Amino acid sequence: MTAFAAAIDDLFADPNIGRDAVYTPEGGVPVLVRVVARRADAITDFGDARLWSETTRLDLRLAEVPQPRPGDRIEIDGAAFLIQGEPVRDRERLVWTMGLRPV
């Protein structure tokens, strides 16, 4: 394991950063995972207008979920979400970042 991979594991294990969640692939079996949730606002340019929207994004370790897909379900603290769009891996191929939408 690289030093960077160990640092990622420490971040996800930290109770102030990482959270328990349940990942359920479409048509599959639920799995307990650790995630880092990010609920940032997004500003999107559309012509001359700038649109503000709330977003729900999260990071998920590739070691726990090798291939998340759009439509897979994630539950965090009783709130259910579906993965929206294609998840994107980080440069080191250790973490998926994905957008979510409420169910």
Image (cartoon, rainbow, N blue to C red):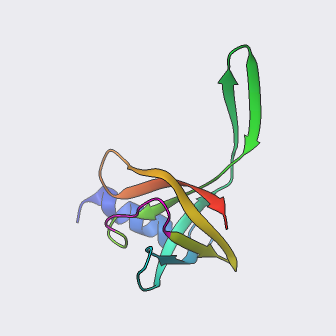
Q: Residue at x 60, y 61 (%)?
A: 37
Residue 14 appears in the figure: no
Q: Is residue 22 magenta?
A: no
Residue 69 appears in the figure: yes
The number of discs equals: 0
Is 44 placed above or below 94 here? above
Is 52 placed above or below 73 here? above
Question: Magenta region's main secondary structure?
Answer: loop
Q: Residue furthest front?
A: 27
Quadrant housing residue 46: top right
Image check: 101 left or right of 52? left
The front one of 4 and 89 is 89
Image check: 87 left or right of 1? right
From the top left corner, tell me how far across and down residue 74 is, in percent. 56, 72
Quadrant housing residue 18: bottom right
The front one of 96 and 8 is 96
Task: Say which quadrant the C terminus sits in.
Answer: bottom right
Q: Residue furthest top?
A: 48
From the top left corner, tell me how far across and down residue 31 is, in percent. 44, 83
Q: Residue at x 73, y 13 (%)?
A: 48
Image check: 23 left or right of 4? right
Image check: 60 left or right of 16? left
From the top left corner, tell me how far across and down residue 41 is, in percent. 72, 43
Q: Residue at x 53, y 71 (%)?
A: 73
Quadrant housing residue 2: bottom left
In the rendered structure, which segment of residues is drawn in magenta?
A: 66-72
Task: Say which quadrant the N terminus sits in.
Answer: bottom left
Is 98 placed above or below 31 here? above
From the top left corner, tell me how far across and down residue 68 is, in percent. 40, 64
Q: Residue at x 50, y 64 (%)?
A: 71
